[in-house]
Amino acid sequence: MFWLIFVLFTVFMIILISGLLFYGEWAAFLSVIRNPEFRFAVVFTLWTSLIAIALAAVVAIPSGFILSRYNFPGKVLVDTLLDMPIVLPPLVSGLALLILFGPILGNALVSLGLDVVFSARGVVVAQWFIATPFAVKTFKQAFDAIDPRLENVARTLGYSPAEVFLRVTMPLARGGILGGLTMAWSRALGEFGATAMLAGITRMKTETLSVAIFLNMTIGDMEFAIATAVIMLLVALVLMSFFKVFTGTGVRL
């Protein structure tokens, strides 16, 4: 029975992906790739998501370590709070970000030249906000898997807390760290709801790949939308496959 369920679900996923791959005309892909709008969306998505993931790592590594190694009052509540971007619909997260960086902090940020709403910065902030909780949870699990006695032994050998973290904890958690970054980056690449609310949907300005699909679907340009969707699918497959092979967490190919 388990094999039957497993095989049926696998077949469903194959049919689902195949339908996306073979529904459109392959000749349309070349014209879409040459399209300046598509090229802008690709470059824009890559650099904003990479910045977002770098910021996510800065936040997620210490957050995941503290949640893994320390007990403090209200830990369960804090852990749940950090999970909220995963639970909430992206549109709700985007609305919360819009209020924070609009009416609450908007004037102060504009006076500093750091406007976030309806700008590329807003795209980075939205991607960071949505992707960071995935990294925090994965990093915490990676740190949980490390025996604290190994860190204690390093301390008895004269290592400082910083040296223990850099020379013992981080190398042992490398697989989980890479996995968390991969998952978070994949999530940032496909982010749409929070980005649309905070940065807006503006062609050739805040147009990520997800926004490009939405914009062209609304005007009936199915070829552009399908080609972009297929490229995003292939990127996601490559990223996840690379992670599983590189870290050894996947089954044999």
Image: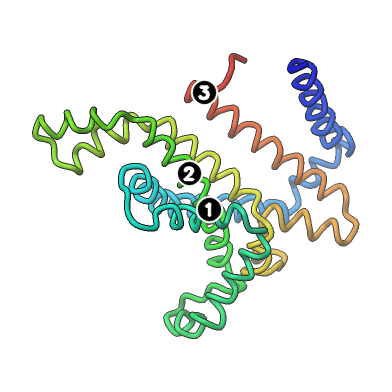
Question: In the image, residue 58 lies at what x, y percent?
Answer: 38, 52
User: What separation in Å lies between label 2 and label 1 (alpha carbons)?
Assistant: 8 Å
Position above or below: 225 against 21 = below
Chain-order first, disc 2 or disc 1: 1
User: What separation in Å lies between label 3 and label 2 (alpha carbons)?
Assistant: 17 Å
Q: Dot 3, crowdedness within 10 Å: few (<14), some or many (≥20)?
A: few
Q: Quadrant of residue 156?
A: top left
Position above or below: 49 against 118 = above
Q: Dot 1, crowdedness within 10 Å: few (<14), some or many (≥20)?
A: some
Q: Dot 2, crowdedness within 10 Å: few (<14), some or many (≥20)?
A: many
Closer-to-camera residue (77/244): 77
* SS for callout 2: helix
Q: Is residue 220 left or right of residue 226?
A: right
Tag 2: amino acid: Lys
Residue assigned mark 3: 249
Q: Going by the picture, which residue comes out furthest to the front?
A: 73
Residue assigned mark 1: 83
Question: In the image, residue 56 lies at what x, y percent?
Answer: 45, 52
Q: Is residue 75 left or right of residue 253?
A: left
Tag 1: amino acid: Asp
Tag 3: amino acid: Thr
- Nearest-to-viewer mark from 3 and 1: 1
Q: Quadrant of residue 201?
A: bottom right
Position above or below: 45 against 146 = below
Closer-to-camera residue (79/167): 79
Residue assigned mark 2: 137
